[in-house]
Structures are given as structure tokens and as C-alpha cells.
Image: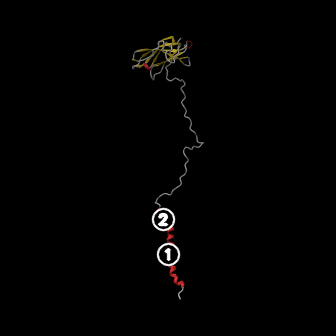
Amino acid sequence: MKDVHEDNAPGRRRVWLPLTILVVVVGLAVAAAFLVPPMLTPAGQPEPTSTPTVPPRDIVSTDAPRPTETPRPAPSESGLPFAELTPVEPNATIVAEGADILLARVEAVQGEAALAGETSGPAVRATVRIVNTGSEPLDLDYVAVNAYSGADRAPAGTLTRPGGVPFEGMLSPGDAAEGVYLFTIPEEDREDVTLTVDYLFGAEVGVFRGDLR
């Protein structure tokens, strides 16, 4: 009589063989899961590194020094916009660059307001004479005549009547021309009057100063 266990031995071996193969395959698959990814990584690719956090540039420490204001140049002590020649008496002649300047007449008149900003009243009418002593024509359209009273040079008002005739046109070398200008200066303020003549761009301004009573 055969042993029952002996008859079932080949069957057991047939069952265990596939199981053994399955276990081996699963083991290889698990091992491949750990080995294959590093092998597929491109050669020479750097590993990712953490980037340090940089604060925004607009964040400034409260202890940082603040910019200082740029110093501005101090105003001129004289306060005069243009360089001036040494003042001369009203009856003298100013010998300037390319021109001689003199007061041909100084008269006391009653000023008449004719334009906006003018005020009627006691006025001084000055006739200014310019002689072109240079070699080039002078453009008289740019001549400016102004008057001031007192040591602090209080500006005098201007008038056109009676008889105001400003300079105009071109003055040839050797020729002379006259312009008539009126200024509202009270009689009590005429002891110290400054009259300036700006006759040429870039040249020093001619200055008369004295008693116009």
C-alpha cells in the first residue's frame, strides 16, 4: 500500500515552484525600484540646493544714514544782475567799451500816466546821448535805462509822457543818438539818484549818480 504523502509530493513541488519564482520576481522589482532612478539621472546634473532668502531692496534699515540736502550757493553780496562801471557825476561822460555815454539834459516835469502801471506825478526827464566809438554798429533796440533813488536804490517808476522817446535802430560807428526817458521821483528824493544805462550785451553797465534837483 502506497503512502498518501508520497503521492502528493510532486504536486507540492509543482505548487511551490511558481510561488518561488513569483517571490524572486517581486524581490527583483523592489530592488529595481531603488536602483533604476539613480541610473536614469542625467550625468553631471547638479543637485538642487536651497537659495538663501534676500530681503527686498526697498526695505531700508531705520539706522541707515539719510541723504543730506545739496547746499545752494549763496546769493551775490551786491545783488546786482550785471557788472557796473564806477559811477560818475550826472554832468560827466562815461567812457565805456565801444561807446561814450552822457546825460545831454535833465529836466523836472509833471509826468502823465498813459500806459498800464504808470502813475502821474512829479518826474525827471533824462535825455541820454550815446556815441558809438567802436568799429561795429550798436543795436539801440536793446538799450535799457533805469533810475533809482537813495543809497538803497529804490526803483523809480517809469513814464512815457510827456516826451518819452526810447532808443531804437542801429547806430553806426562814429555816429551819435539820443533817447528820452521819464521817471517818477519825488522832488525830496532827487538829492541822491542813480541812473543806469545798459547799452551792450556783455558790457559793463554805465552808471550816473548824483543830485538831480
Numbered tag placed on residue 117 in the rendering: none
Amino acid type of the residue that numbered disc 1 sits on in the rendered structure: Pro
- Colour scheme of the picture: secondary structure
Q: Nearer the viewer, mark 2 or mark 1?
A: 1
Contact check, label 2 and label 1, Cβ < 8 Å: no
Q: Secondary structure at mark 2?
A: helix
Say few, some or many: other residues with alpha carbon within 10 Å of mark 1 (under 14 / 14 to 19 / 20 or more): few
Which residue sits furthest right? 63
Write down the quadrant of residue 189 in the picture: top right
Q: Position of residue 202 (x, y in %)?
A: 45, 23
Residues 82 and 28: in front is 28
127 or 21, nearer to the observer: 21
**Label 2: few (<14), some or many (≥20) within 10 Å?**
few
The residue tagged 1 is 18
Q: Quadrant of residue 97?
A: top left
- The kind of residue tagged 2 is Val
Residue bearing the label numbered 2: 36
Please provide percent x and percent y for residue 137. Answer: 40, 19
Badge 1 element: helix
Residue at 50 percent across and 68 percent down: it is: 29
Classify 143 as above or below 65: above
Q: Residue at x 50, y 72 (%)?
A: 22
**Residue 138 position in % (x across, y down):** 41, 19
Give the Cα separation between the discs numbered 2 and 1: 26 Å
Please tell me which residue is depicted at 54% across the width and 84% down the height of the picture. 4
- How far from the left and from the top, in percent, is residue 207? 50, 18
Query: Mark 2 or mark 1: which comes first in sequence?
Result: 1
